Amino acid sequence: MTDALDAIMAVMEKAFDPRYGEAWTRRQMADSLTLRNVYVTLITTEGTDDVDPDRITGFALTRQVVDEEEILLIAVLPSEREKGIGKALLAEVIERARDRQVKKVFLEMRDGNSAEFLYRRFGFEKIGHRKGYYRGAVGGPLDAITFAKDIN
């Protein structure tokens, strides 16, 4: 049986194109999972309840600070995209944050990321722009866009 970290890394390896330098290393992910106020949400095609790591199709990693939460990573296997999994995952992340009394959710994405339509559909609004933020990208640093959404 696969453990959750192995499953997360398998999704990350397939979901993040290496030319953009967005994926985290196993060490970064493992270290983050030991921190207080860091949460992981796993999803399969059936949803987010009682997820078997051998069947994970996506995940989200978030960090809460007081009444704000940041989506650090969110990923869905390429073979499972455009099936509503990303939508269900983002909805669950927001609902869990709301249950923890979070009032605002933030996320940052690479400028030009096709997931922007999903974030905007959920009511996230652009609040910032970071020039050259993704430094590991092939062909030079890429800009990041910061989004926020009130959820209270």
Image (cartoon, helix red, strand yellow):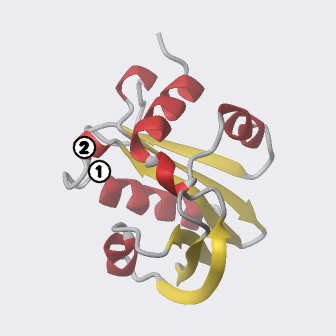
Residue in view at x 66 percent, y 71 percent: 133
Q: Earlier in the sequence, mark 2 or mark 1?
A: 2
Residue 101 visible within the image: no
Q: Is residue 142 left or right of residue 44?
A: right
Decide: few, some or many residues near mark 1? Use Cα within 10 Å; few <14, some 14-19, many ≥20: many
Residue in view at x 33 percent, y 37 percent: 44
| Image quarter of residue 117 | bottom left
- Provide residue 1's location: percent of width, then percent of height: 47, 10
**Residue 110 vertical placement versus 77 (above, below):** below
**Residue 65 vertical placement versus 20 (above, below):** below
The residue labelled by disc 1 is 85
Question: Which residue is the extreme one toward the front?
Answer: 139
- Provide residue 123's location: percent of width, then percent of height: 40, 83
Which quadrant of the rendered structure holds the C terminus?
bottom right
**Residue 64 vertical placement versus 131 (above, below):** above
- Provide residue 147's location: percent of width, then percent of height: 54, 80
Pick the residue in front: 11 or 103.
Answer: 11
Query: Please, what secondary structure does the residue beneath circle 2 have?
Result: helix
Pick the residue in front: 133 or 65.
Answer: 133
Q: Disc 2 vs disc 1: which is toward the camera? A: 2
Q: Amino acid at mark 2?
A: Glu
> Residue 80 — which label?
2
Residue in view at x 41 percent, y 45 percent: 15
Tag 2 near tag 1, CB within 8 Å: yes
> Residue 140 — which label?
none
Query: Please, what secondary structure does the residue beneath circle 1 have?
Result: helix
Residue 27 visible within the image: yes
